[in-house]
Image (spheres, coloured by chain):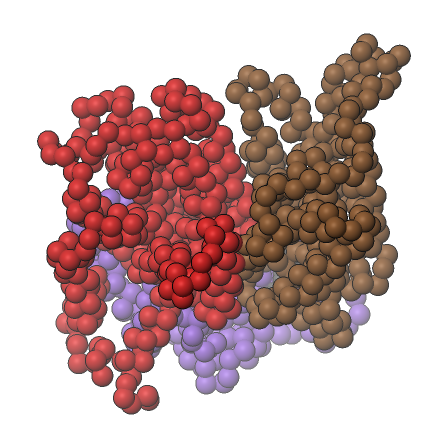
Amino acid sequence: MFYRENGQYKTSYKADQALFPIVQDRIFIGLVMVIAFIVIPVFASEYLFRAIFIPFLILALAAIGLNLLVGYCGQISLGTGAFMMVGAYAAYNLAIRIPELNLLVVFLLAGFVTTIVGMAFGIPSLRIKGLYLAVATLAAQFFMDWLFSRVKWFTNESSSGAVSVPELQLFGFLWNSPVQKYFLVLCIVALFALIARNLVRSNIGRSWMATRDMDVAAEIIGIRPMYAKLSAFAVSSFFVGVAGALWGFVHLGSWEPAAFDVNRSFTLIFMVIIGGLGSILGSFLGAAFIIFLPIVLNQIPAFFGIPISTATAAHLESMIFGALIIFFLIVEPHGLARLWAIAKEKLRLWPFPH
Amino acid sequence: MIARDIGEVILKVEEISLAFGGVQALSNISFDVREHEVRAIIGPNGAGKSSMLNVINGVYHPQKGSVTFKGEKRTQMDPHKVASQGVARTFQNIALFKGMSVLDNLMTGRTLMMKANLFQQAFYWGAAQREEIKHRERVEEIIDFLEIQSIRKTPVGRLPYGLQKRVELGRALAAEPTLLLLDEPMAGMNVEEKQDMCRFVLDVNEEFGTTIVLIEHDMGVVMDISDRVVVLDYGKKIGDGSPDEVRNNQAVIDAYLGVAH
Amino acid sequence: MGALIEVVLGGLMAGLLYSLVALGFVLIFKASGVFNFAQGAMVLLAALAFARFSEVMPMPLAFILAALVMVLVAFMIEKLVLRHLVNQEGIILFLATFGITYFIEGAGQLIFGSDIYRIDLGLPKEPKIILESTFDGGILISIEDLVAAAVAGLLVLLLALFFQKTSTGRALRAVADDHQAAQSIGIPLNRIWVIVWSVSGFVALIAGIIWGGKLGVQFSLALVALKAIPVVILGGFTSVPGAILGGLIIGVGEKLAEVYLGPIIGGGIENWFAYALALMFLLFRPEGLFGERHIDRV
Ligand SMILES: Nc1ncnc2c1ncn2[C@@H]1O[C@H](COP(=O)(O)OP(=O)(O)OP(=O)(O)O)[C@@H](O)[C@H]1O
Ligand SMILES: [Mg+2]
């Protein structure tokens, strides 16, 4: 009843191919924008920005990048943390070696550096498929772990790869309050989400999905597998690289390679799975879920007044997290985005189910 | 049958041999296809029919022999290059892009004609937008032609078998091929669906002048719609000619009746 | 010359352990189509159980109890996870084993503790010098490693025989080929799964004891199994000989690289070198060590 496309006739293909052809979707997106750009900045506390909103947005960006590769092109990567690491250290090197560079340019260039690295690590995808490829991408993770902790040039001779960046300066202003950082990140993420959405409804997005669904048929219809796969690695890595740069510069400020270790890669893949493969919205939902889960889990014992040690809490958290992953995969392998789609479908028919 | 101008030879396969390990799927096969004709390939199960199509569009690389298409001779070529020469295809076991809508499947069929670069696509701007709309118009014509308007936004995985076959034909047509390869387009269909499919195939052939190579098990259909027929059995060619000639060929009769070799 | 042989020998001995863990992967993949990422967590759990049990009881008893723990784990995994994911795609199953990993790591440390525990099998720690007469300076060999390699080698042999000769092994191969068909001829899938996961838990126990004895039982044991992954990439997920030979190749390659390449490019390369080796190989031979070239049918 509330979510209907009946009666919304489109008079041109242009209208039908708009970003959000259905009015209710446009309203929903508008609302989200209002909340993100106005309500949250007005009401949220510094703690919320620092602990939730900023990391959420940055990880959502990385999740979108990963989703382009895994969800749309069907090439599984377990090395996303490594590509974030490349982005972060590339940005660091650019920033300290060419100090006059605008910070936004630094982030973009860091994205491009990651693109190149990502494509190099995407080459095996031309030869091996599926799970073989998935576990092979761990190579990127372990290689980068090594590279940035052992090769001193990349970390400006700092020991064990720990680096820190100066305060954020952009267009002659200091961006050091959480609200300012939030706005910076929000604008970047919104832009990238739009780009991702555009790509997946264009020719390149279709060639990724075709490769994912039936690679032989895709090639027979004229899609070059090498181009489809490597472009997916490239674009995905670009997103992830920018996310890595933001994670280092905006969220952490100082970091070492362990900040982007294999666990970061795993959390990202969970965001994508739990959120929904092949869904931009799902990337946000998944990121939100993974960010909130530990915070909620941490509160529960305190809420019931049960005193437990941090180690015990960490182990419990790990157990619950694992159980939830399994639960999710069993109950809804298509993720939160699917639940959202089902809910919309219900609304569309309600109150007359057929 | 409506008289079409059957033209010159457009596709020629010569002495193709293909083996998988110990299995000789094709041995020394030669035949040709003329422009605008409907050429059928028939034969019992495992005769090598699908393998033949796979050789033509570059999926399988034969150990011996050559394929000449539009005067260009080759021994090996990647499928996407063959596609860019104007060859499209449907599959025996439907090979649609399951996670995508009917519309997107058909739009994917036009991928070779899309030229907008990555940045234009990223911002859905300029050539990217113009192209999307232009190709959408062409795809809508195909949707109308195949009478699948009502399912254009449905994910193809949810469609019944018969409709999937039709969508797959649509995807191949979207590429506007000169040569269309159809691998058992009517298999598993009921009589009515078969009639529809026959009509589509003939319409394509007549209206667009598309050359068609067709594998089909239903002899009635083959005799009705094809101009010439190649018969394969155990990877060997045992007959080649008009439907009538093939029907009266003793070797073909034996193969179909299962006479011992 | 003596030094080279020493390195190669060391590589072969380490390689046998990789082969062993790789066989754990292969076993499970063959029987249930699951690439079991939880193998490392299982090693950790088994080692923890053994270490803690052996603090309060004689070692053989601790060993049996720890093995029982692993059977219990196999049973629970079948009951709570696999059963509900039967016809899912490989990737979903794979990710489910991440869930298992987190759960086991959490539960294991919650129950058995998260400090560093020692396993002392009473083997001499000092290396011995052999073949002094043949080579200048002789060859340095660690008794501990030698015993470990012998045990691992024996187990590898037993598992290979188990696959080829026993009826369970044969049923297992049938299951691997086609789940539905196997079920329809009356092979009880669920029981097979419990068996292979138990066997693989047993493999984890042996690996855990060997590595735990060398490194101490601690969380990082869970990561050691990651080192067996390049072995299965190289050898193929379903190939028993692939796992064995792959393990040896990776073991030797890694040691050689460590000794001869490491000093040049900065050391500490053992974490990624095996992957690089496996990938290099696959670029030239995508079907792996023993795999047959497969052409997609359309
Ligand atoms: N990719 C492949 N790998 C191995 N063997 C193959 C492959 N493709 C085809 N074959 C073998 O080649 C032979 C011919 O197969 P093909 O599919 O061409 O027969 P067909 O005439 O299309 O039969 P059907 O009527 O059953 O479709 C068969 O023995 C088949 O098993
Ligand atoms: Mg066939």
Q: Residue at x 23, y 77 (%)?
A: A3
Judging by colour alone, the chain drawn in red in this rendered image is A
Q: Nearer the viewer, residue C274 or A309?
A: A309
Above/below status of B114 relative to C251: below
Q: Colour of chain C?
A: brown
Residue A28 on image: x %, y %: 20, 67
- Asked whether, in this view, residue A241 is left or right of residue B72, the answer is left
Q: How many marks?
A: 0
Between residue B94 and residue A90, name the one nearer to us.
A90
Q: Is residue A223 left or right of residue A196?
A: right
Where does the image place residue B184, in percent across and percent down from the top left?
53, 70
Tell me the quadrant of the picture where the N terminus of chain A can be found: bottom left
Image check: C297 left or right of A126? right
Chain letter for purple, please.
B
**Residue drawn at x 82%, y 22% as measured from the top left:** C128
Query: Residue A248: x, y in percent?
Result: 31, 37
> What residue lies at 81% left-to-right and 9% top-to-bottom?
C136
| Relative image position of residue C226 (x, y in whole percent) | 60, 43
**Residue A354 against residue A97 in the figure, above or below:** below
Relative to C225, say whether A309 is above or below: below
